[in-house]
Image: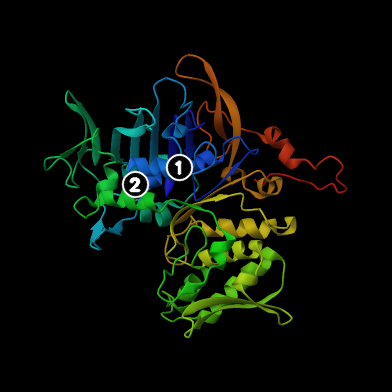
């Protein structure tokens, strides 16, 4: 779980600090850079797996196309000045993970703060492209005694916090930066704390974050942080992927584009319930059909996945009330997207952070409450212990929809606006700001907030509307 994100110098995020809970809705106008928050989260996830070059290429360029000049990632990156991106992520990591060889690893402590700073190296010759450079990298623990101060969202300390914030650390950092005459090194410290000699890695020659190089259980807590960051993903469901057939030997987990929908639902339906010890496919299919009916406003009699042994594929069928039976490839784009969300809700193995862009697209306004209920149900319930019936998932959405804003609890809202900031050279610049609601758990001392008056355009009926309804932000 990503509990706090701090970003300086990335795209239009000149200086942003955000506290996250299980569910967060970022609301703001189109074109102001809300998606750059998702880009920053995705970039951190890429940095945990890939080289700096590959990570920079995978993030959307300034034009929205993946694979551009790395200067696209920097604040005012094409002006000749010092380019630097600094990021920090506070996170709750899994207590137990597997390394790249399948061996188990147990983290010393599960509440961590990761920091990374990146610079830019200009191309050496004409026609070349510059590259990112690793300047600093640190991974430190957050003591259990401080967890309540860092986890500011409403939660049950006994059943939730004490079950996910476990272990302790007596030593210093797991990763630390040391500036030497010969250059900057990143020291890798073992889980034994101050015991043992740290392993230095030259930052200038790394070509990637040191965290991304930890692949075995020799450094279990660093590996757990890496696994957590790798679980941060942007869900961008594509109709072609959702309609693609699944063969019997392929993956049985939903991809971020929606591929393997039928195989995933088949696997979930056949799995044994952890509480009863029995598989109940009919109950799984019935729950998915019921939630989908609420979302798309159509009568659905049943949903099931058939295994075609001759063609060696899984086929998902939806049967409407009235007898019409349709394969997944014949369903509308909106129906397929929400079917995928209903399947995710049933999958306890799908954990981590999910970012979703404008989930209201394709939804009839009358079905918005059902859509938002489903998305909020995807997130872990912080009043209960995370388990198979309460998967440890986190959801962040962005929207410009008044309907979604009106349905959200104020504590879950962040208002995205473009505001003037003082830049490093003494001038002023316009950059993205994310404001919490006044009086909510996110409000900090002397930090800007938004009030009802700031979002009146979300709450008022449009000019010429024929109906007048009492619209209020939920308390």
Q: Position of residue 425 (x, y in %)?
A: 45, 15
Crowding at mark 2 (Cα within 10 Å: few <14, some 14-19, many 20+): many
The answer to which quarter of the image holds residue 97 is: bottom left
- Indicate the colouring scheme: rainbow
Q: Determine whether label 1 and label 2 are within 8 Å by CB.
A: no
312 to the left or right of 108: right
Relative height, residue 319 to residue 448 (above, below): below
160 to the left or right of 257: left
Q: Is residue 168 visible?
A: no
For the view shown, which residue lies furthest in the front direction? 126
Q: Tell me the residue that label 1 is attached to.
A: 67
Point out the image quarter for the C terminus: top right
Q: Tell me the residue that label 2 is attached to.
A: 48
Q: Residue at x 55, y 59 (%)?
A: 377
The answer to which quarter of the image holds residue 176 is: top left
Q: Residue at x 67, y 66 (%)?
A: 294
Q: Position of residue 230 (x, y in %)?
A: 38, 51
Element class at badge 2: loop
Q: Is residue 332 visible?
A: yes
Separation (CA) of disc 1 from disc 2: 18 Å
Q: Residue at x 44, y 29 (%)?
A: 9
Element class at badge 1: loop
Crowding at mark 1 (Cα within 10 Å: few <14, some 14-19, many 20+): some
* Upstream in sequence: badge 1 or badge 2: 2
Question: In the image shown, does 204 or 285 lie closer to the viewer?
Answer: 204
Question: In the image shown, does 292 or 150 lie closer to the viewer?
Answer: 292
């Amino acid at each position: 779980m990503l509990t706090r994100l701090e970003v300086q110098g990335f795209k239009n995020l000149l200086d942003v600090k955000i506290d996250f809970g299980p569910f967060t809705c970022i609301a703001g106008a189109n074109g102001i850079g809300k998606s750059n928050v998702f880009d920053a989260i995705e970039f951190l996830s890429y940095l945990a797996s890939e080289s700096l070059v590959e990570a920079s290429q995978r993030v959307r360029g300034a034009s929205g196309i993946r694979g551009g000049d790395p200067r696209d990632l920097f604040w005012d990156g094409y002006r000749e000045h010092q380019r630097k991106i600094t990021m920090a992520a506070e996170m709750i990591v899994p207590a137990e993970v597997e390394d790249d060889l399948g061996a188990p690893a147990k983290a010393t402590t599960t509440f961590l703060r990761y920091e990374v700073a990146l610079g830019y190296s200009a191309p050496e010759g004409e026609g070349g492209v510059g590259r990112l450079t690793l300047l600093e990298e640190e991974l430190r623990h957050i003591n259990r005694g401080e967890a309540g101060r860092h986890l500011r969202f409403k939660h049950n300390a006994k059943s939730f916090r004490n079950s996910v914030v476990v272990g302790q650390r007596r030593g210093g950092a797991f990763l630390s930066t040391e500036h030497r005459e010969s250059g900057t090194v990143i020291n890798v410290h073992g889980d034994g704390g101050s015991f043992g000699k740290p392993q230095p890695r030259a930052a200038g020659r790394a070509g990637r974050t040191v965290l991304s190089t930890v692949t075995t259980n020799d450094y279990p807590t660093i590996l757990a942080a890496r696994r957590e960051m790798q679980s941060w993903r942007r869900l961008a469901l594509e109709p072609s992927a959702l309609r693609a057939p699944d063969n019997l030997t392929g993956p049985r987990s939903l991809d971020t584009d929606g591929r393997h929908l039928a195989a995933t639902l088949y696997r979930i339906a056949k799995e044994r319930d952890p509480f009863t010890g029995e598989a109940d496919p009919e109950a799984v299919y019935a729950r998915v059909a019921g939630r989908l009916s609420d979302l798309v406003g159509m009568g659905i009699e049943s949903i099931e996945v058939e295994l075609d042994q001759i063609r060696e594929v899984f086929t998902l069928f939806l049967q409407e009330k009235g007898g019409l039976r349709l394969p997944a490839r014949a369903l509308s784009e909106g129906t397929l997207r929400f079917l995928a969300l209903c399947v995710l809700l049933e999958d306890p193995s799908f954990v981590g952070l999910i970012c979703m862009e404008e989930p209201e697209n394709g939804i009839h306004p009358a079905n918005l409450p059902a859509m938002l209920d489903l998305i909020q149900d995807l997130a872990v319930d912080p009043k209960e212990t995370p388990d198979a019936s309460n998967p440890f998932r986190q959801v962040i959405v962005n929207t410009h929809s008044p309907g979604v804003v009106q349905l959200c609890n104020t504590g879950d809202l962040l208002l995205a606006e473009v505001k003037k900031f003082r830049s490093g050279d003494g001038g002023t610049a316009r950059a993205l700001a994310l404001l919490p609601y006044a009086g909510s758990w996110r409000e900090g001392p002397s930090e800007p907030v938004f009030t009802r008056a700031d979002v009146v355009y979300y709450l008022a009926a449009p000019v010429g509307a024929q109906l007048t309804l009492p619209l209020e932000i939920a308390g």
